[in-house]
Image (tube, coloured by chain):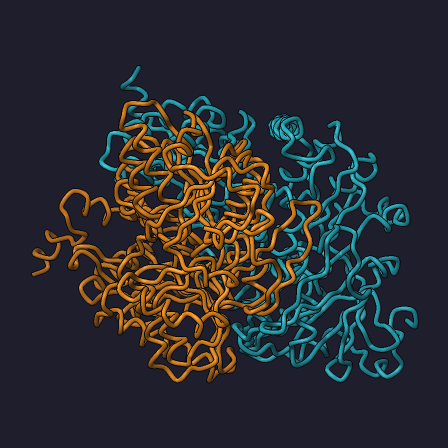
Chain colours: A orange, B cyan
């Protein structure tokens, strides 16, 4: 315990999760650590959920870094504690409650959340719960596998509860770099010019008077297994690599590229993983989440340094990862998400932003969040922080979904997260559409020709050609049909117009 | 002439506009100065247009800062010279050709254009034409009433033509602050922390070997008159000021606010102009365009400093403005648009971003560009540079257009430029919707209740209520009806469903 809780005056604050859970009152605004299912508090949220399950009326607003694990998003949703949620989630119980309108969810650019706390846009923050590997002699907090907004919550919340998680190795100490950004008009340039710059402290500065309780736990991060790389993902990765190789040949990128940012999940992991087989070397990563593929790239000698705000290693390789942790430690850094997702830094470093789309339309608009325009999947996450500020902005999607009942290339996306102004390149397993500098009509042809699935090409051209007959020809649309594919899917279970097909046959 | 062209070696380069126009060949990529109808080249473009009118085949790609005057966008469009256009325009001839698909137009975030030149995404730039008030002894260029991308074009174009415009007063010398941003991976923090920081030089550094020709002209900037402030604009301004006053009361803004950014045009001018009658003082402006209202605010002692990339004073007050120019000179600065529109700076300073919407939907998405989804108006301009990075992001629109045949609040915008993630506050003459932190359904009620025109409220609620009956309730939509208001307008000339209204009666 002495190695984990090094501050003598705080030993009296150690309590059970159950005791700590009693501090939470109906209507409170609570900020927690956690970004992906890594570094989020577990023991206290479970006990808050138990209070509600035992009949107590307790509703909370929960603000995190990004997604968190089932002990937090799952249990608080299930128990009805979660009333309002910011800024991102991936938990199925939470998602269902959002789509049933039982939870008020506002999905936000991840770089906005810390600012909003500071600016007072969420109102007062009552309690922060942060996971730590240790507390220093001075009472400062050493985070675990993610930082997210923990530094901001610790500074702005009235009170703090720390979960010291002994399943998180003490070796993590030293990989964090906590830098605080002032609010305007006092804000200064963030002094980071290379992905491996260390600009802050190893710990989160904490006013120990604000600590309400310290809870010990050993519940492990519920990180997610990553899927095997399938043929479709492999083709997407190959297409992306070919595109990047060409950019180098055309002198639009240096030989070791520029810092890579990649979205989260199996497809993103597979696409990044594809770089293992590329000729690229001396790569660097400036992203949110360091997942398995980045570790593979470090092991393969392809990536020399990776910066993120979260370290999410899949369960099956976690033990191996920590057994060799000293090999990686000087190649990894975790930063607050205000820094990892900073537009200032993304643009300065010139990141290559690679994110996943749910669907893309013929003019290059991207839907990242709402399936069929209405059903929230996860949220926009950090994709907008990077897409608008990347040196290159790339979106990847498989050309079809649901065994072909959905075309991911549509006449008009049913929800817009990234506009035509922010999307440079679309990659599907079919090919690559480089949209830079093209007018909307030129983009449409590139996207249909290079990226759409063969089963939907004809129907896309049909829509586009009819639209081009209309009165205004800059972004041609047939407004009565723009969303008809989605409408048809909702009504028939497929975007394919089977009637028109059988007529054609 | 000696005061305007101070470099001895360059005197031999003086030529007529007609001679200079001969350097342009079919297929060239040309960058020009100009941002709003201010500081754009005039004499040479007129002569290029004449060549085409006389039967020569000459098609060009034109890249500017933003909109420019009729001698450039009008004449080159009319004569068929303009084949491709970036990144923004407001000229009616040019707009019509874009909407007829005669000009390939790609409208871009204005902060992206200088980067794209540097990154090579537009290909090679053959010639830059920049307007100047003078050329220094060393051959450097002193810009006139705007900077835009002139510094970048002068650095990256193979050759340069300078138009020295003697109608632009030499007193302008000294208000420019030219700072060059490196490309990644060499980019450094931009050392600007206050709106009045001077971080660069008074002139554009120029390799004089690249100067092909110097043309003298005295054609004046064709700036646009601004409309009188009407009752509707006044109500919008009043609503905005009331909102800002409340933010100060709630301690979410300092008493002198934060740097103001405002879009361009009569409505934006009127809204800013409303601040003259407010209690605010010691205001500062960090924007793109310094237009009449900013000068009024300086005269009224409300604004103590204004930074922009363009100085656009309406024709009727231009003489008066220059007669008192020394009163203003130390309160104004012009910067390259890479700096005026920099996300890094906008976020650091915490600008209050106030931009104009064409239409807004019930979930807070904004259309700034394409009327009825297809007809390009002007372009997104710098609104996205500020909206995503502002401390506060406000969009203003009159609640109706076309005498009420169009509702500016619609079920779903027909084109998306600013997503729900970037829009905090909507202001119409009806009222203010503060959307911060709300879920989509909460936003819908706020927008309909506070911002929609009374004539459309019932129809908006009807759509929303029907949508809420659907399967997915996060962002409820009835996809078969989402764009039906626009479709109806295209077919009947009005968004109002007159059939359903008469049935209701």
Which residue extends farthest top? B505
Residue A114 visible in rendering: yes
Q: Quadrant of residue B293?
A: top right
Residue B420 visible in rendering: no
Q: Is residue B280 above or below residue B79?
A: above
Give left or right: position of B303 versus B428. right
Percent of width and height locating residue A441: 39, 62
Percent of width and height locating residue B454: 45, 21
Q: Is residue B399 above or below residue A411?
A: above
Percent of width and height locating residue B380: 53, 52
Q: Quadrant of the C terminus of chain B?
A: top left
Percent of width and height locating residue A63: 44, 40
Q: Residue at x 81, y 70 (%)?
A: B216
Front residue of B395/B376: it is B395
Q: Is residue A398 above or below residue B232?
A: below
Q: Quadrant of residue A446?
A: bottom left
Front residue of B6/A242: it is A242
Which residue extends farthest right? B2
Front residue of A119/B66: it is A119
Q: Quadrant of the N terminus of chain B?
A: bottom right
Front residue of B498/A154: it is A154
Q: Residue at x 40, y 45 (%)?
A: A216
Give left or right: position of B297 versus B467. right
């Amino acid at each position: 315990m002495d190695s984990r809780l090094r501050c003598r005056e705080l030993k009296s604050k150690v309590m059970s999760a159950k005791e700590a859970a009693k501090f939470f009152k109906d209507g409170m605004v609570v900020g927690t650590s956690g970004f992906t299912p890594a570094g989020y508090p577990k023991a206290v949220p479970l006990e808050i959920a138990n209070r509600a399950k035992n009949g107590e009326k307790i509703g909370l607003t929960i603000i995190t870094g990004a997604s968190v694990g089932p002990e937090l998003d799952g249990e608080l949703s299930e128990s009805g504690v979660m009333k309002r949620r910011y800024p991102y989630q991936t938990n199925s119980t939470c998602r269902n409650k959002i789509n049933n309108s039982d939870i008020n969810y506002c999905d936000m650019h991840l770089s906005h959340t810390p600012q909003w706390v500071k600016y007072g846009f969420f109102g007062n923050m009552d309690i922060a719960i942060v996971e730590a590997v240790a507390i220093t002699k001075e009472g400062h907090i050493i985070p675990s596998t993610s930082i997210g907004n923990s530094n901001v919550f610790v500074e702005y919340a009235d009170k703090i509860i720390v979960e010291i998680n002994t399943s998180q190795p003490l070796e993590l100490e030293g990989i964090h770099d906590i830098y605080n950004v002032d609010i305007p008009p006092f804000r200064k340039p963030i002094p980071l010019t290379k992905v491996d710059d260390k600009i802050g402290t190893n710990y989160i500065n904490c006013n120990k008077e604000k600590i309400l309780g310290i809870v010990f736990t050993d519940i492990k991060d519920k990180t997610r297994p990553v899927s095997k790389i399938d043929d479709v993902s492999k083709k997407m990765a190959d297409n992306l690599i070919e595109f990047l190789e060409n950019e180098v040949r055309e002198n639009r990128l240096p030989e070791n590229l520029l810092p890579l940012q990649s979205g989260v999940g199996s497809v993103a992991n597979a696409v990044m993983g594809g770089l293992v087989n590329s000729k690229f070397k001396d790569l660097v990563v400036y992203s949110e989440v360091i997942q398995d593929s980045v570790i593979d790239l470090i092991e393969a000698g392809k990536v020399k340094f990776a910066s993120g705000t979260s370290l999410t290693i899949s369960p099956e390789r976690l033990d191996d990862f920590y057994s060799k942790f000293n090999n990686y430690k000087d190649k990894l850094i975790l930063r607050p998400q205000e820094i990892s997702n900073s537009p200032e830094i993304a643009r300065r470093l010139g990141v290559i932003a690679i994110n996943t789309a749910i669907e893309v339309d013929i003019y290059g608009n991207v839907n990242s969040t709402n399936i069929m325009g209405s059903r929230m999947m996860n949220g926009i996450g950090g994709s907008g922080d990077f897409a608008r500020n990347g040196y290159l902005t790339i979106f990847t999607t498989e050309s079809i979904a649901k065994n072909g009942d959905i075309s991911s290339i549509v006449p008009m996306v049913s929800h817009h997260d990234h506009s035509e102004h922010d999307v440079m390149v679309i990659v599907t397993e079919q090919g690559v559409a480089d949209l830079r500098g093209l007018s909307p009509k030129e983009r449409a042809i590139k996207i249909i020709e290079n990226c759409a699935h063969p089963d939907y090409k004809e129907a896309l051209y049909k829509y586009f050609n009819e639209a081009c007959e209309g009165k205004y020809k800059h972004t041609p649309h047939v407004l009565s049909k723009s969303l008809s594919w989605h409408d048809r899917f909702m009504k028939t279970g497929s975007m394919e117009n089977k009637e028109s097909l059988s007529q054609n046959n």
